[in-house]
Image (spheres, helix red, strand yellow):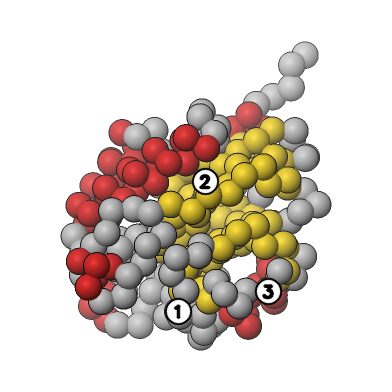
């Protein structure tokens, strides 16, 4: 399963998405900072599942509707940072969906996530991530889950990885930095956390008009890796 995650930088990179999906064969597309009011119903071969509604620049998810059947989709509010309360409110920072995979005959959870900006503390972002895990778990208890997005967490990755491991999640970073606009803030901002999936590769794709670079996650459910019974 191939998933692309992309922070569009206030929707500036919206015109790049069709070629990204087609060129890389993406089956899931998770967006951040998308103009949710004016999103197309289709991007390449993918269909819009849902977009957040309470903030204009928000989250969206597209899926390959031939392979996947979306059973439910939900947007969630997470603990707000001072930036959210004072400057530019972002009410919904998590978009999750329970999806049935027709190829495997099984269900899983996919999510697009956008953490609080760098003006907030890492401790707040860890709270947001923990809350996101709990919310996604309520959609489908015990189901394999993959959450991609802009985590705004470029340093102290070891602490985050340990925090995720304690929650039963793996953290995988891409092969190259995903944010290089400013020297002081460059690093791996966009990555994937998951449970029940084997992450084969997280690839940073080419630079476009956003200050973030898109990433593509290639994943497979753990059950699919088990040998067939004799």
Vertical placement of 174 versus 146: above or below?
Answer: below
Vertical placement of 132 versus 156: above or below?
Answer: above
The image quadrant that residue 184 belongs to is bottom left
In percent of width and height, residue 213 lies at: 48, 74
Question: For the residues carrying marks 1 and 3, which lies nearer the camera in this image?
Answer: 3
Q: Residue 30 carries which label?
A: none
Callouts 3 and 2 close, C-beta under 8 Å? no
In the rendered picture of this protein, how many numbered marks are placed on residues? 3
In percent of width and height, residue 141 lies at: 51, 29
In percent of width and height, residue 186 lies at: 31, 74
Q: Mark 3 points at which residue?
A: 40
**Which residue sits at x=78%, y=40%?**
103
Left or right: 144 in relation to 45: left
For label 3, the SS is loop
Of the two numbered discs 3 and 2 on the same chain, state the one appearing first in sequence: 3
Left or right: 88 in relation to 12: left
**Which residue sits at x=62%, y=44%?**
72
The image quadrant that residue 27 belongs to is bottom right
For label 2, the SS is strand
Position of the C terminus, as image quadrant, is top right
Which residue is at the far front? 54
* Closer-to-camera residue (196/82): 82
Crowd tier of the residue under label 1, counting other residues whose Cα lies within 10 Å: few below 14, some 14–19, many 20 or above: some
In percent of width and height, residue 176 lies at: 44, 67
Crowd tier of the residue under label 2, counting other residues whose Cα lies within 10 Å: few below 14, some 14–19, many 20 or above: many
For label 1, the SS is loop
Q: Which mark is residue 146?
A: 2
The image quadrant that residue 43 belongs to is bottom right
Q: Which mark is residue 9?
A: 1
Q: Distance between the residues labelled 3 and 2?
A: 24 Å
């Amino acid at each position: 399963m191939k998933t692309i995650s992309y922070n569009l930088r206030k929707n500036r990179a919206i015109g790049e998405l069709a070629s990204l999906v087609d060129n890389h064969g993406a089956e899931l597309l998770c967006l951040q900072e998308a103009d949710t009011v004016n999103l197309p119903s289709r991007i390449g071969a993918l269909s819009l599942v849902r977009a957040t509604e309470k903030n204009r620049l928000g989250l969206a998810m597209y899926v390959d509707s031939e392979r996947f059947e979306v059973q439910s989709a939900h947007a969630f509010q997470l603990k707000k940072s001072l930036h959210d309360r004072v400057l530019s409110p972002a009410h919904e920072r998590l978009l999750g969906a329970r999806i049935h995979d027709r190829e495997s005959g099984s269900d899983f959870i996919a999510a697009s996530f956008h953490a609080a900006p760098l003006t907030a503390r890492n401790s707040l972002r860890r709270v947001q991530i923990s809350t996101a895990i709990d919310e996604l778990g309520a959609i489908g208890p015990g189901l394999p889950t993959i959450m991609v997005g802009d985590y705004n967490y470029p340093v102290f990755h070891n602490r985050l990885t340990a925090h995720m491991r304690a929650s039963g999640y793996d953290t995988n970073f891409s092969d190259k930095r995903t944010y290089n606009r400013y020297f002081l803030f460059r690093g791996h901002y966009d990555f994937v956390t998951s449970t029940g999936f084997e992450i084969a590769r997280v690839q940073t794709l080419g630079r476009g008009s956003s200050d973030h670079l898109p990433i593509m996650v290639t994943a497979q459910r753990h059950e699919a890796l088990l040998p067939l019974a004799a």
